[in-house]
Amino acid sequence: MKEKAIKLKTPLTSEQVSKLKIGDRVLLSGVIYTSRDAAHKRIVDAMDKGEKTPMEIAGTVIYYAGPSPTRPGNPIGSVGPTTSYRMDSYAPRLIEKGLKGMIGKGSRGKEVIEAMKKHKAVYFGATGGAAALIARVVKKGQVIAYPELGPEAVNMLEVEDFPLVVINDVTGADLYEEGVKKYQK
Amino acid sequence: MREIQVKEITAKLRELFQSACYNLGEDVIEALDRARKAEESPIGVAILDEIIENAKIAREGVYPLCQDCGLAVVFIDLGQDVHLVGGSLEEAVNEGVRQAYKEGFLRKSVCDCFTRKNTGDNTPCILHVRIVPGEKIHIVCAPKGGGSENMSRVQLLPPAAGVEGVKKLVVDRVRESGSNPCPPIVVGVGIGGNLEQSAILAKRSLLRPLGNPNPSLELANLEQEILEKVNRLGIGPAGLGGRTTALAVHIEMTNCHIASLPVAININCHSHRHKEAVI
């Protein structure tokens, strides 16, 4: 693990993400959007029909997460990452549209990694199960689309120094594979 | 004969599920502390620190341990000398779940299989009831996250596969699961019975406190051997590489049909939540 974390602010550009390498620690600030299984289906359906998506896709970072309910007075509930492979069938469509970052946990499929290489996007890992800890980096939270999906609604989150690790960079390298190799006996 | 109002069960479950989602068990925290001391990977140590800190924040009672507050799994051992009054047991249990998830600001994660429409109150729960001697009710609640449950499997091995086949199956399953189930994980293994019994045994094995091996020396040794193999995979905390892939392997075994060797592997994340009470 590199000692010093790289500070980034959304929206991200191809240039910014191209500099990131697997294992880099990133502190991400700015606006990100939560979206998981059901919301991804709706977003891609909207794209198919030529309808407007709930957020601008270009330059955006999507967080695969479905928070626990927000207590009155708090910006959000607990909000750790969900397992990313379930969004693999949708992700390449969004990456083609200019999505620059995805935050989740767990390995991505070949097609997603190829799309990241081709269109310059990265996949960040957040610590699975550290949901209460992550809630503290969220300064503002608001449901902006699909409220009827309950925990699967799209939230706009304003985050400050969200601690992340680069899992897949624009070269197609994979931190999960490299990290495990080091400690395999 | 002892008469018990079902509303007592409702009240107990309301309390247990909230406690489980905010207060990680001492046995789990101790296991995480031990893993933290033994971990060689710097990033592994950093992740374990985050997980331990997360448990402290959750204990304050504002943010649940994990946003995935799980499917509500309930085990009840019902004394055969108990007479339940005041309504149906199943409805009382579901009402306890409903109240816990609403009052505790816990995420409702139950939906229709095809339309994916959320039921809105985290019911129906999964209820396992056994009738046992006595006049008490033993209740265990075990909220179970979807990410680790998705990595779980049941396999009906041929008898010739033997104990070596079981070891291979478990280690392969953990390897293939990689970072998905939020390691460090707890691996529950149910051996024997049939399709559904092996799965229930695996689930029940997860309820045993960490640090308590199976009372059978043979199975305790098997638990230890598989744990060592799993921790040589290198997956590590959050799957980023390290020594701590699993905190424990728990095995429960019973007899099976002469034609089969059923093995169920139920994987739990480090948010290893369960609480119990006796009425």
Image: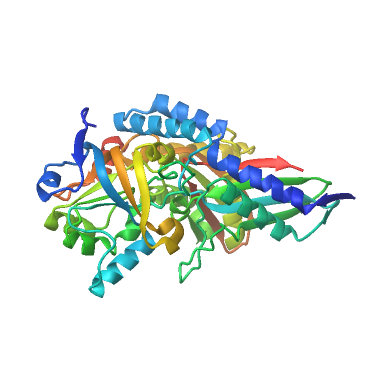
Q: Is residue B233 visible?
A: no
From the top left corner, tell me how far across and down residue B117 is, in percent. 48, 67
Horizontal relation, residue A161 to residue B72: left or right? left
Horizontal relation, residue B140 to residue B35: left or right? right
From the top left corner, tell me how far across and down residue B216 is, in percent. 63, 39
From the top left corner, tell me how far across and down residue A103 is, in percent. 29, 48
Q: Quadrant of residue A167?
A: top left
Residue furthest to the left in view is: A15
Q: Is residue B221 above or below residue B136?
A: above
* Residue depicted at x 49% and y 36%: B58
* Residue depicted at x 42% and y 47%: B171
From the top left corner, tell me how far across and down residue B22 is, in percent. 54, 39
Q: Is residue B233 above or below residue B191?
A: above
Most foreground residue, A52 or B277: A52
Q: Is residue B50 visible?
A: yes
* Residue depicted at x 50% and y 38%: B62
